[in-house]
Image (spheres, rainbow, N blue to C red):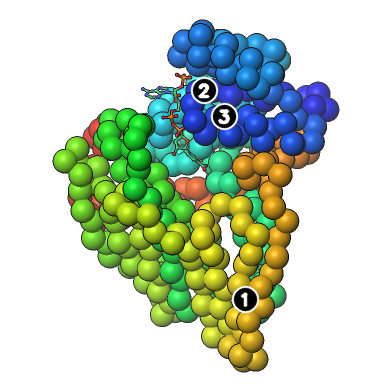
Amino acid sequence: MSKTIRWGILGCGKIARKFASDLALVKNARLVAVGARSAESAKTFSQEFNSSKAYGSYQQLAADEDVDVIYVATPHAFHYEHVMLCLKRKKAVLCEKAFAINARQAKEMIAFARSQKVFLMEAFWTRFLPHYQKVKELIAQNKIGAIKYIHAEFGFKPSAPISPRIYDLALGGGSLLDIGVYPIFFALDLLGSPNQISATVSFTPSGADEQCAIQLTYANGATAQLFSSFQSNLANGADVVGDLGRMRLTHRFHGPTTQLEFYSTTQESKQVIEFEVAKGFGYEYEAQHVTDCLLDGLTESPTRKLEDTLLLMETLDRIREKIGLRYGADKS
Ligand SMILES: NC(=O)c1ccc[n+]([C@@H]2O[C@H](COP(=O)([O-])OP(=O)(O)OC[C@H]3O[C@@H](n4cnc5c(N)ncnc54)[C@H](OP(=O)(O)O)[C@@H]3O)[C@@H](O)[C@H]2O)c1
């Protein structure tokens, strides 16, 4: 593999534009090719972000010998198909969340990547953001003690023009897979797999979940209360509370932020930890991590492990079972 990691982008939509812009901030990385369903869309994107090649099909992108890693940025319902396409051509893959529609698909994707000895990672950008790294560090230093309670919420009211993938079940629509993954990630990453899950939901006329309230209960007595919504603009904050202190992740806890609040219960003090404003949209951190992993010859990330991804997908399945939410891919 060359010293500069050569990136391709599959699917030239909304998030792909932010990612491509952030890729310019990443050391030892270069966008070399993009693939879209139409040559016109690929060409427009390629001109905007300076890639030398633009393909009017995903197959052509996956076959390009000059591409090392492909960022898959299509709606969730296509992640399985598009990731498998790239892995079959021995391309490393960074795949957007939700990683797949269900755990069965995720297991197959992971098993195939491992059999091919090709790098695969879920694009869980939050895991790589500086404020979240600090959360992990403070927990590892036992600053808040044993975690007893987690709260996390993510909700917004989609405004026009609304992307079809938001409500269309055929595209994996609904709040749970789109934004519910963030509060759930937060609880799983800090507390692990829950003993018990309870959940309530309200559905849209299309059958997608519009709002989902989830409670995870743990063997050690810890509880996580999580919420996703397409009904209203929420504060989108998160709290993690231990017996020695607590942390509050303020507005947009899942994205780059300049502040983290730390409260010590023992000293009855509040400390605000400051972070520099991200240079990009915040996707540069995960892209740098993948680039570094590939330069080191790794086939899995030691930070966002494939087991973590599988646990998230299995938990989503358990929640969907509780609320009676099924996608077409669940039947096959
Ligand atoms: N990490 C984050 O912060 C973040 C934020 C937003 C979204 N996402 C995730 O990124 C993925 C894409 O989201 P997005 O908002 O970028 O979606 P989008 O703009 O609606 O669609 C992305 C692209 O997917 C391609 N596509 C392929 N088949 C399609 C089909 N049948 N219908 C619609 N599009 C199709 C299209 O690209 P071409 O026509 O160019 O091929 C489209 O532009 C989702 O899984 C989403 O959850 C992540």
Q: Residue at x 35, y 43 (%)?
A: 158
| Left or right: 234, with 245 as reference point | left
- What's the residue type where badge 3 is placed? Arg
Disc 3 to disc 2, C-alpha distance: 7 Å
Helix, strand or loop at mark 2: loop
Above/below status of 328 relative to 156: above
Image coordinates of residue 113 in percent, x first then y, are 56, 32
| Left or right: 308, with 135 as reference point | left
Q: Earlier in the sequence, mark 1 or mark 2?
A: 2
Q: Is mark 3 within 8 Å of ligand 1?
A: yes
Above/below status of 312 relative to 10: below
Disc 1 to disc 2, C-alpha distance: 39 Å
Identify residue for label 3.
17
User: CB atoms at circles 3 and 2 under 8 Å apart?
Assistant: yes
Above/below status of 260 relative to 107: below
Name of the residue lying farthest toward the front: 160
Helix, strand or loop at mark 1: strand
Identify residue for label 1.
262
